[in-house]
Amino acid sequence: MTSVRDLGQTDDSIADLQADIAAGRIAGPRMYRCGPVLDGERPSWPSALRIVDGPQAIGAVKTLKAGGASCIKTYTGLPKEAFRAVAAEARRQGLPLLGHTPHAVNLRDVFDFEVQHFNGIPYLDKPPPEDADYRSQDVSAMTEADIAEVIALMKANRIAILPTQANQKARLTASDRQRFPPTEGLRHLPSFWEQAWPMIVAHPETAEAVAADLDGIAAEVAFVGKARLAGIDVLAGTDVVMPYVVPGESLHLQLAMLSDAFGGDEAALAAATQVNGRHVDRGKVGRIAVGNFADLLILRKDPRSDLAAVRDWQFLMVGGR
């Protein structure tokens, strides 16, 4: 990885890590961060900023920008007035807006936004669930007409998507370890994570819920394939705290799923480089070009015909180092 983006700061150590990398005190990928997520009256995460109205939203965006944030992330419980104020102030501050589409906001009223997962997408004409960000079965239930309407809306409103199917697939290990064994990357994580995951994120508990997630994953893969063909930006990335999601490895797994969705490895690689670069730091990362940072990954074989070649890298440069 030559660049990473943190989308949910939990404490000040994230900013300290970014500063240490930028100063060259430790070697690491170029790092971007949004700071804490902006949520509503009852935040989903203890680290989230509680935002209940427009003035508070504007102040939060200004504070995050002053603290070095390069993007703003919203969350599911953010009120409509606060979301609109966040969007307007983020635009004034030149900060990309991304995250979970708040339940109080219909996707029709969202512009210049990067949707994470499928929050808000199945709910143009019905209310989102009260007990979840979105349900797999609601994605599976979308008709071809529904999909066409959402994709047209996303294109008109300049909405991109970071779909993260690798997250959902990894969660199933917690549901049925025999059927969905852990990936080899698990051996790189501290053992306490297996005890921590159940306290952080739920997983499907029944055979019916597992089947619904599998159907939902297939529906999402089909959706993002159609979205890309329509000109929607589909980004490559995953979460960290999801059960059995291993940082680094999970991106490779997501790329394989995007390759299936797009019908080719080269398009999946473009999602992780050119498309991600447009959203993370346009004109600076994601492409080899004059004016961009000197970030290079030299491989032994051409990955456009075999994604596995990305793992067999020979030389890595970040910022000319």
Image (cartoon, rainbow, N blue to C red):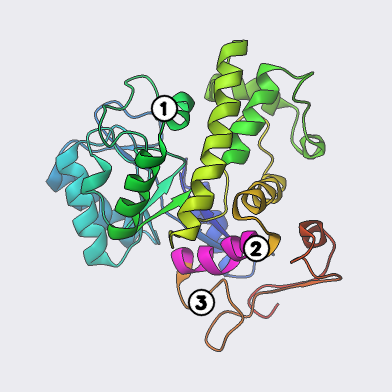
Judged from the image, the secondary structure of the residue bearing numbered disc 1 is helix
- In the foreground, 26 or 302: 302
- Magenta: predominant secondary structure element? helix
Residue pointed to by mark 3? 284
In magenta segment, residue 269: yes
Between disc 3 and disc 1, the foreground one is 1
Judged from the image, the secondary structure of the residue bearing numbered disc 2 is helix
Image side of residue 14 versus residue 156, left or right: right
User: What amino acid does circle 1 point to?
Assistant: Asp
> Which quarter shows the N terminus?
bottom right
User: What amino acid does circle 2 point to?
Assistant: Leu
Mark with earlier residue (3, 2) = 2
Image side of residue 115 versus residue 94, left or right: right
Q: Tell me residue 31's x, y (percent).
A: 55, 61
Q: How far apart are the alpha carbons under marks 1 and 2?
A: 29 Å
Judged from the image, the secondary structure of the residue bearing numbered disc 3 is loop
Mark with earlier residue (1, 2) = 1
The residue under the point 29% across, 67% down is: 94
Q: How far apart are the alpha carbons under marks 3 and 2?
A: 17 Å
Binning the other alpha carbons within 10 Å of mark 1 as few (below 14), some (14 to 19) or many (20 upward) gives: some
Between disc 3 and disc 2, the foreground one is 2
The residue under the point 60% across, 49% down is: 261
- In the foreground, 203 or 42: 203
Residue pointed to by mark 2? 269
Between disc 1 and disc 2, the foreground one is 1
Image side of residue 136 versus residue 293, left or right: left
Q: Tell me residue 101's x, y (percent).
A: 33, 41
Residue 163 seen from this side: no
Mark with earlier residue (3, 1) = 1
